[in-house]
Amino acid sequence: MSISRNFYVLFISCLILPHAPLNAADLVDIYREALDQDAKYAAARAEHKAAQEKIPQGRAGLLPNLTLSGVRQRQLINPDGRPEVAITRGGVTIQAVQPLFRMQNFIAYEQSKIQVMQADSQFIIASQDLILRVAQAYFDVLIAQFDVRVEEDQKRAIERQLKQAKANFEAGNSTMVDTKEAQARFDLSVSKLIVAKNVLEINKRKLQKITGRYPGVISRLHENHDTNLLVLKYASMNDWLAVTQHNSLTIRVQQLVLEMAKHEVKRARAGHYPTLDLVALYSNQKGVGGTFTGRGIDLTTKQIRLQLNIPLFSGFAVQSRVREAMATEEKVRHDLKNTYRDAELNVSQEFLNFTNGRALVKAQIEAVRSSQSQLESTKLGQEVGVRTEVNVLNAQGLHSLARRDLSRAYYNLLMSRLKLKAVAGELGEEDLIQINKVLQ
């Protein structure tokens, strides 16, 4: 589906803010501020950094365990009623244990690798979420700014109508009812303007929450409009569904959760397996046996041994942990199936939102063209005396509403594009840069 070049030119010309400041904050600038200032993203970054330590922790179960212990004591004894004798005892023991076969430790190491891969995918999801949050907050401010201008235009038009109604009443050409109706419309327009300004302030505060800075002037559309933004990378919904099946980060995370659950079953079963360790020990003890003989001796011990442990019975705890792990694995399988279905639903929704939103943009462009023609005709009618200034103001108000609806439809279209790419696992900073080319 394509939109003619004339449509684009009209669209951009309708959304350009006259005399826009050159130092307006753009979308990419705000996004890069958010990379440093957003608390949610900073927490995700710290969580990702912490997760990288899982591999060293898992590997530790396969490496030697070295311990050093020492003791020194002084003891007074009275052997067989003889005078007290002071016995000094001390010693140093060094022991190294190298696991040779501990199935649970091997599985734990494999699980640590899966945990790191899972953390990597979750951090990318957090990065994509930041892009979506920044874009949504930015577009919300743009729409709210446009709403304020529309309500200001409406207020000016109705104020002129009120003045004309009062003048007609004073001249005896209308009744008090006409004046009160005009006053009611004016009061309503004032309240709508207050609401619009309040929404704008709230949306700016939401953007401030992400960037840590109250936004100043927000940039708007310029004439160098990239029409590629209205064309998707993949033409059909089925193509997007296929890409999502392979690239979705949410699905990837859940697949890794399933792998963890499978390894947990193996780890639980490993409770039945024997363990084999290589143990090396060096002990240097002084004053050994002095408590009994009254005179201690020095004793040095050096040994290397293989230590085999065979579990025989643990009160059925291992069997219970195996059943628990298997039930958890079954639960995770169902969660993965649900994740696939959620991804399909989200892709379908965002694809339809984009395609229908593109059609809506085209329809709104036509509405802007029609309202523009009506405004020009009304101005011409005023020049020849068949239309009044109030008629012109009303036409201007309708034109402002049409432009507002067009801008809202376009921003929603851009958000649908970003959300669709996020669901498919293909959203990145480059997408914001492309959008930023039409925002200044």
Image (cartoon, helix red, strand yellow):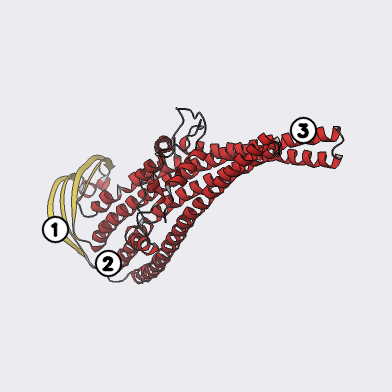
Q: Which amino acid type is shown beneath numbered disc 1?
A: Arg
Above or below 334: residue 119: above
Residue that numbered label 1 is attached to: 305
Q: Earlier in the sequence, mark 3 or mark 2?
A: 3
> How many angstroms separate mark 1 from mark 3 (CA)?
104 Å
Residue 357 image label: none
Q: Which amino acid type is shown beneath numbered disc 3?
A: Lys
> In the image, residue 219 lies at what x, y percent?
47, 34
- The N terminus, quarter of image: bottom left
Mark 1: secondary structure: strand
Q: Which amino acid type is shown beneath numbered disc 2?
A: Ala
Mark 2: secondary structure: helix
Q: Earlier in the sequence, mark 2 or mark 1?
A: 2
Q: Camera-side residue: 67 or 302? A: 67
> In the image, residue 280 lies at what x, y percent?
15, 52
How would you rate the neighbour count of disc 2 (Cα within 10 Å): few for under 14, some for 14-19, many for 20 or more? some
> In the image, residue 144 lies at what x, y percent?
57, 40
How would you rate the neighbour count of disc 1 (Cα within 10 Å): few for under 14, some for 14-19, many for 20 or more? few
Q: Nearer the viewer, mark 3 or mark 2?
A: 3
Q: Camera-side residue: 219 or 177? A: 177
Q: Is residue 202 visible?
A: no
Residue that numbered label 3 is attached to: 163
Above or below 280: residue 37: above
How would you rate the neighbour count of disc 3 (Cα within 10 Å): few for under 14, some for 14-19, many for 20 or more? some
> How many angstroms separate mark 2 from mark 1 (CA)?
23 Å
Residue that numbered label 2 is attached to: 270
